[in-house]
Image (cartoon, rainbow, N blue to C red):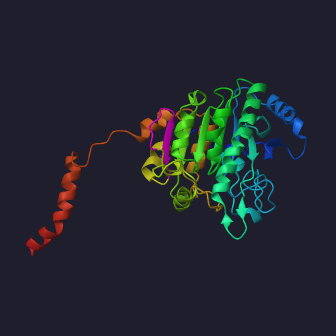
Amino acid sequence: MKFDTALHSKTTHPLPVFRIDSWGWRLVCPDQPVRDFKFMLRHRLAGMERDLPVTIMVHGGGFSPFSNRADSQMTIYARHLGPKKWQSRAWPMRFSSIGIAHQGNMAIAFGWDAIKTELLSGPNNAALFEAAEQEAANLATLINAIKEIEADRIVNIICHGLGARIVMQCFQYLTGNHLNRVVIMAGHEFSANTLTALSQSNTKGTQFYNLLSGATRLMDHRANAEMPKSGPKDRLIALGFPFQRHNWIDVKTSQNEQRRQVMRGTSLPILRKRFCKWCFGPDRSIDDLITRIIHNAPNTSVQTIRDRLFVAKPAPEDDQTGFLRRHFRIMAPMRQRRAR
């Protein structure tokens, strides 16, 4: 994949953000009455070029627009993070906007209450799981509203953790095939539910990029054990999706070989030292990959990435040169003893 200079971090700007909070099964904006959110959205979309996509960002557990300490709109959705927010990494800064800031892409920050606790029991994962399912209808309302305003507008989604459950469950409420690309980071939705969602007609034209992270492996295994699942063999898509679908691809970002194949030709500068619990690593390569996907850059389709990742290689026993190298390496100590 040739690096697209138009997506280099030096020539991009933080995404302009349109903030919407979901509260009490309603979409609300803190600055305007509930009834005005469609009017405001129509005004923002009118200022964008028709061929530019809209990116909806859906956060996971641990953030809430109603929490003073972990307000998603002031941390993960902030365009610029202050020095006291070092544990978060701002999505609008990471995934950027092409061109002039006021003419670039727009991101919609979908905030939902992902902090559910019980007295003296810590996080209640089952309650969070159910809350995410209830938010699916609200997210679908937002997506349907965008398509009602501009039917030809491209809509992409970035989601993390429990946000993947909201996204996968929202397809049952969509009025059409409205989503173009969905990027999932360490998704806390189960494979059986995902398979059901992918079988719906609303997902036929959508491409899914499931990014797996070694940095969140322990957290994913814990969530897999504590969250309610349909059966004992069911597992989180953060641990890999076991079913083959033409519009779905798993990318193991912790494997250098896969990262080299996907990000071929891309420089890997070190990102500023902002690290948080859901982070995929301190380097810029994963951010660049997601930026390309949501901006519909060339050679970022699911089929293209799959062709690069699964190039047939000769088996080790069929590779004669490899067999000889291993043979001489194993026999080297014996040859040295005989030489003495």
Task: Say above or below: 68 vs 6.
Answer: below
* Span highlighted in magenta in the image: 242-253
In the visual, does 131 lie left or right of 318?
A: right
* Viewer-closest of 75 and 162: 162
Give me the residue at 59% from left, 45% from top: 184
* Viewer-closest of 162 and 77: 162
In the visual, does 153 lie left or right of 212?
A: right
The image shows residue 301 at horizontal and vertical percentages of: 53, 33
Based on the displayed image, in which of its 4 quarters is residue 306 positioned? top left
Determine if residue 5 is in view: no
The image shows residue 63 at horizontal and vertical percentages of: 72, 56
Task: Say above or below: 119 vs 270.
Answer: below
In the visual, does 40 lie left or right of 261?
A: right
Residue 159 on the magenta segment? no
Give me the residue at 61% from left, 29% from top: 202
The image shows residue 45 at horizontal and vertical percentages of: 79, 31
Based on the displayed image, in which of its 4 quarters is residue 279 positioned? bottom right
**Total tally of numbered discs in the picture:** 0
Give me the residue at 49% from left, 40% from top: 249
* Most distant residue in the front direction: 231
* Most distant residue in the bottom direction: 340
User: Where, quadrant-wise, is the C terminus in this rendering?
Assistant: bottom left
Task: Say above or below: 224 vs 99.
Answer: below
Determine if residue 169 is in view: yes
The image shows residue 240 at horizontal and vertical percentages of: 48, 48
Residue 249 on the magenta segment? yes
